[in-house]
Image (cartoon, helix red, strand yellow):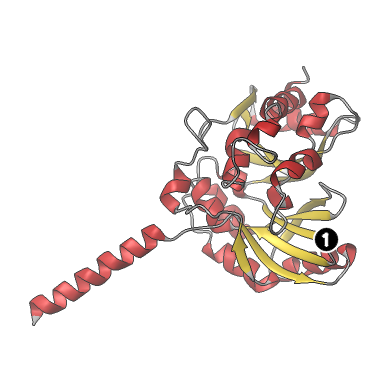
Amino acid sequence: MKFRILSTLLGCLLFGAATAADTTYQPFILASVNDAGLAEQTAATAAALEAAGFTVAGDYSPVDNARVIVVTSPELQAVAALSDKGGYSAGQRVSVTEREGGTEVAFVNPLYIQYAYRLEGDMQPVYDRLKGALGETEAYGAEKKMTAKKLQKYHYMIGMQRFDDPSELGSFDTYEAAVAAVQDGLDAEGDALTMVYRIDLPGNQQTVFGVGMRATSDADEEIDIDAAHQLAIVDFEGYSKVAYFPYEVLIDGTDVEALHMRFRMAVHFPDLSMMGEHGFTKLMASPGATEDALEQMVTGQ
């Protein structure tokens, strides 16, 4: 009898571990689709998020038919502060997109980010709070089986960057000087980069800026980083994935960095092919142009 009970318990433990290991995650969560106008639904979404305990850190329009709201909270920042590069996850991106007679509300999946960005903390409470505020209709964005293990070591293919291969944008004598350099760069007028939000993590020297990218001229280097240009290539089917933007720049102590686009875009759009009309090769110049633009913003050179 004891052997049978022990065998049953062991089987349950093993089955449970296997089930958890096999759980797959999608990068985006559709909260709802309704017939409200863009402005009305954006205001309602922001109000629902604030009522749920989030603070709106910033919002903007990466493309004409959508707005992205970035929120944070003490709970979210506490999780972010536990990890070496946790600042990348301190802002939760929520999109409101008007198209085809309906308005979609969606958010980036915090659990997906938890594993893709190698967070030490648990994002399930953040997910539950977002779901309670906005709803949950379905997860989408990856037909590939993106398990926690795969996300934690993700790269699109051999030779392409992982989470721990960021674009190194600058190094300064002090944390304060690094923050000031990024702030000054984003305050400069006339270029394609704008500040969407700033979040300072409590208890450590990490600050994350959300950077909007929208071309102000026909120059190739601006078109290559333009959000509408990039989304026209990668966001071509299914529900809106405009909450891929804005782009994060992280100050970590005296260093300034950003996730390399060849990692960041690939992990948000893992099903995209390399070739074809909507393949990554259509954006071949964008990773380098993004890195150059962000470095110039930080260093002024």
The disc labelled 1 sits on which kind of residue? Arg
Going by the picture, which residue comes out furthest to the bottom?
1
Q: Quadrant of residue 272?
A: top right
Give the residue drawn at x 55%, y 65%: 125
Q: Position of residue 172 (x, y in %)?
A: 65, 23
Give the residue drawn at x 68%, y 25%: 288
Q: Does the image show residue 135?
A: yes
Q: Does the image show residue 184?
A: no
Depth check, front residue: 100 or 10: 100
Q: Quadrant of residue 267?
A: top right
Depth check, front residue: 249 or 30: 30
Q: Where 197 falls versus 129 (above or below)?
A: above
Q: Where 261 falls versus 237 (above or below)?
A: above
Q: Quadrant of residue 232?
A: top right
Question: Which residue is labeled 1 in the image?
Answer: 99
Q: Secondary structure at mark 1?
A: strand
Q: Position of residue 238 (x, y in %)?
A: 69, 58
Q: Would residue 80 be found to the left or right of residue 228 on screen?
A: left
Q: Would residue 301 be found to the left or right of residue 138 on screen?
A: right
Q: Quadrant of the C terminus?
A: top right
Going by the picture, which residue comes out furthest to the top?
301
Q: Position of residue 79 (x, y in %)?
A: 54, 54
How many marks on residues? Answer: 1
Q: Position of residue 109 (x, y in %)?
A: 60, 58
Depth check, front residue: 209 or 13: 13
Q: Quadrant of the N terminus?
A: bottom left
Label 1: few (<14), some or many (≥20) within 10 Å?
Answer: some
